[in-house]
Image (spheres, rainbow, N blue to C red):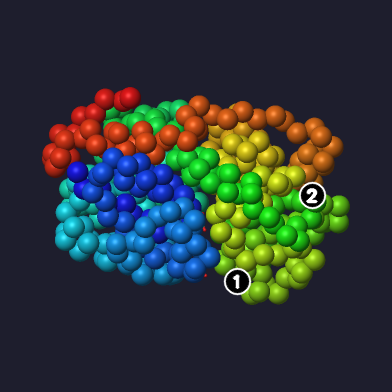
């Protein structure tokens, strides 16, 4: 069984690492392809070393571009790799452009696709990631879901139940493995109490009025609670372009994985528009205020520590005050977020028969 993994952007790396690791322990043949969607050292290389991922066998080096250009470029460069390497299964992760591009290539070549983190839906088709999720799940042969809502969404969309495997949350595998290292890390120069902020969604950073509004809210909060803000390259570009002065905040370059875990676990609260951070804060039992109107991870709201405030400054301020006044809601860790999701995926993959026709795949749910 030859398994080829495709990763491309920062949130893919911590999802792929536990699956690669579990397959390695089971002596499976593996190939790792990096599309090069993220290419800065601090958005990519440092994650590979901290997560113990091997250097990619292939780097497609696509870099940045419009959605169409980036997706098309990945497809054009990935197709010959699949033809040459002849994998039995290609695994794609999450919801980035690399995910959908690789899945499309494989489905046309009749190579089985497994989607890790399948079934998540924000029901907001203005998000590029929602389109990526919908398309990938329609063409994938194996759908590995993190929680029950994923299974329900897929069944509503007509996905055959035997393709769906609820395996739990692979991101939590990485978190659990590297949390001891994060706990030991000395983070010099940090305030005693702080809100950790991340911001990069096009809906929040591409419009100058919206971005200015959010940053003004953060400047207001910063008057009574320090803001620590590792700035995503997209956001940095926009802040510079719009000439916004945010120097009063603790701005950082994007931080490596272990450092970011350390920042999260010590934070008084996290304010974010990321997807994965909603899950990590739920696991860490740190209050999370999400600057979006919807989430593809509703379990972080119903069970976890997450609350959605959209771009509404008053709701944001109210939620910040709640946390500071000790009125935060306690959270619980969802089932199967237990550090073993990668192993479950590996076991399912290694029980597949080699090279059946895609239509012959019939698996039972665990
Ligand atoms: C992508 C994903 C998003 C994910 C995010 C995590 C899609 C559609 N979006 O968004 O789901 O949450 O990654 O970061 O796939 N840039 C650099 N250096 C890099 C990478 C990017 O400077 O290493 C800059 C480029 O100028 C680029 C911009 O950041 O134009 C945005 O990068 P891109 O990969 O297009 O999307 P993200 O916003 O990072």
x, y (%) of residue 263? 66, 51
Of residues 157 and 186, the one drawn nearer to the viewer in this rendering? 186
Above-or-below relation of 75 to 365: below
Q: Is residue 131 visible?
A: no
On the image, which quarter does residue 65 sit in? bottom left
Q: Which mark is residue 193?
A: 2
Front position in the image: 154 or 46: 46
Q: CB of residue at label 1: within 8 Å of ligand 1?
A: yes
Residue 93 against residue 157 in the figure, above or below: below
Residue 125 is left or right of residue 203, and the answer is left
| Foreground residue among 273 and 342 | 342
Query: Looking at the image, do the residues carrying marks 2 and 1 touch, with CB atoms under 8 Å apart?
Result: no
**Which quadrant of the rendered structure holds the C terminus?**
top left
The CB of the residue at mark 2 lies under 8 Å from ligand 1? no
The quarter holding residue 202 reads bottom right
Compute the Cα span from label 2 to label 1. Answer: 28 Å
* SS label for mark 1: helix
Sort mark 2 into few (<14), some (14-19) or many (20+) by Cα contacts within 10 Å.
some
Position in image of residue 333 (x %, y %): 58, 30
Q: Residue at x 62, y 41 (%)?
A: 281
Left or right placement of residue 193 versus residue 198 in this view: right
Q: How far across and down, in percent of the image, does residue 47 sit?
A: 48, 58
- Residue 266: x %, y % from top left: 70, 46
The residue that label 1 is drawn on is: 237
Residue at 44% x, 58% y: name it: 48
Name the residue rendered at 69%, 39% in the picture. 287
Mark 2 vs 1, N-terminal side: 2
């Amino acid at each position: 069984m030859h398994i080829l993994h495709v990763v491309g952007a920062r949130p893919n790396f911590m999802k792929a690492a536990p699956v690669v690791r579990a397959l390695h322990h089971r002596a499976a043949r593996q190939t790792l392809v990096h599309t090069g969607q993220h290419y800065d050292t601090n958005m990519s290389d440092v994650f590979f070393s901290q997560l113990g991922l091997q250097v990619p066998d292939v780097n497609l080096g696509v870099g940045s571009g419009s959605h169409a250009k980036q997706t098309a470029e990945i497809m054009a460069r990935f197709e010959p790799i699949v033809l040459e390497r002849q994998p039995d299964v290609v695994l794609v992760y999450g919801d980035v452009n690399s995910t959908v591009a690789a899945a499309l290539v494989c489905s046309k070549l009749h190579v089985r696709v497994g989607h890790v983190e399948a079934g998540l839906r924000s029901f907001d088709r203005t998000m590029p990631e929602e389109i990526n999720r919908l398309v990938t799940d329609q063409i994938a042969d194996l759908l590995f879901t993190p929680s029950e809502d994923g299974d329900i969404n897929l069944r509503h969309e007509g996905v055959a139940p035997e393709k769906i495997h609820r395996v739990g949350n692979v991101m939590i595998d990485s978190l659990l493995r590297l949390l001891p290292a994060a706990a030991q890390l000395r983070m010099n120069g940090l305030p005693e109490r702080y809100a950790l902020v991340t911001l990069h969604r096009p809906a929040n950073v591409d419009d100058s009025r919206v971005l200015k509004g959010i940053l003004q809210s953060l400047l207001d909060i910063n008057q009574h609670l320090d803001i620590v803000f590792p700035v995503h390259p997209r956001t940095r570009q926009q802040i510079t372009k719009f000439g916004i002065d945010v120097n009063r905040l603790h701005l950082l370059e994007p931080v490596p994985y272990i450092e970011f875990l350390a920042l999260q676990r010590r934070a008084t609260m996290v304010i974010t528009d990321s997807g994965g951070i909603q899950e990590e804060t739920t696991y860490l039992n740190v209050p999370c205020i999400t600057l979006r109107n919807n989430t593809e991870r509703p379990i972080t709201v119903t069970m976890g520590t997450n609350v959605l405030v959209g771009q509404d400054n008053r709701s944001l301020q109210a939620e910040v005050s709640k946390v500071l006044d000790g009125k935060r809601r306690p959270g619980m860790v969802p089932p199967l977020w237990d550090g073993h999701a990668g192993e479950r995926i590996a076991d399912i993959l290694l029980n597949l028969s080699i090279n059946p026709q895609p239509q012959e795949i019939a698996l039972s749910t665990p």
